[in-house]
Amino acid sequence: MQSVVVNVESIQIDEAGKREEISFTTNGKLYQKKFGYYLRYDEEMGIDQETTTTLKIKDEVLTLIREGAVRMKQEFEVGKVDSFSYQTPYGRLDFNLIVEEVYIKTEAKKGRIKLDYNLKDKDKLVSQNQLTITYKEVSNV
């Protein structure tokens, strides 16, 4: 396990064309396993609503797991449609995830992940999304 600095950039365009950009930097932990990597970090979802995000990175497949204020598990694999539930304090929403692109470059000291995907509620487009996550080892200076 090693400490890393994680930078998350998200672009979301809803069905009406409204664009929302979010970016933040946080501290995280990187674990190397036999089959790939785990990257774990905390993110604020609002006042007193912290969520732990875990990325399971294996070859060209990424699993994103959120636990805390919101709960969900998404699997990103190009060409695959993944159904998932998004559990919030206000209720549960069910979506389909249509993955357009998965770019993963992971190393022990740094890495970059880029995901392009669409969210649908049944057959209705909810949003087009781009998520870029980079990490780098914390230098002991």
Image: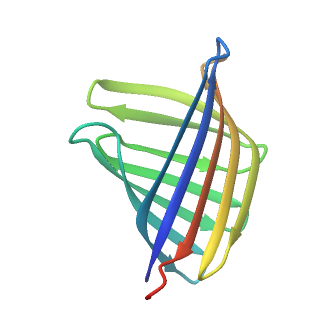
Residue at point 53% right, 81% down? 32
- Residue 27 position within the rendered picture, expressed as x and y whole percent measured from the top left: 40, 66
Looking at the image, is 118 positioned above or below residue 2?
A: above
- Residue 34 position within the rendered picture, expressed as x and y whole percent measured from the top left: 58, 84
Residue 44 located left or right of residue 62: left
Residue at point 49% right, 84% down? 139
Front-lying residue, 44 or 54: 44
Q: What number of labels is visible?
A: 0
Front-lying residue, 70 or 92: 70
- Residue 130 position within the rendered picture, expressed as x and y whole percent measured from the top left: 67, 40
Front-lying residue, 13 or 103: 13
Question: What colouring style does the render use?
Answer: rainbow
The residue lying furthest to the bottom in this view is 141
Q: If the image is split into quadrants, where does the N terminus sit? A: bottom left
Residue 88 located left or right of residue 110: left
Looking at the image, is 80 positioned above or below residue 110?
A: above
Looking at the image, is 126 positioned above or below residue 26?
A: above
Corner quadrant of residue 98: top right
Residue at point 54% right, 52% down? 8
Q: If the image is split into quadrants, where does the C terminus sit? A: bottom left
Residue at point 65% right, 79% down? 107
Corner quadrant of residue 2: bottom left
The residue lying furthest to the top in this view is 16
Residue 63 located left or right of residue 76: left
- Residue 46 position within the rendered picture, expressed as x and y whole percent measured from the top left: 30, 37
The residue lying furthest to the front in this view is 141
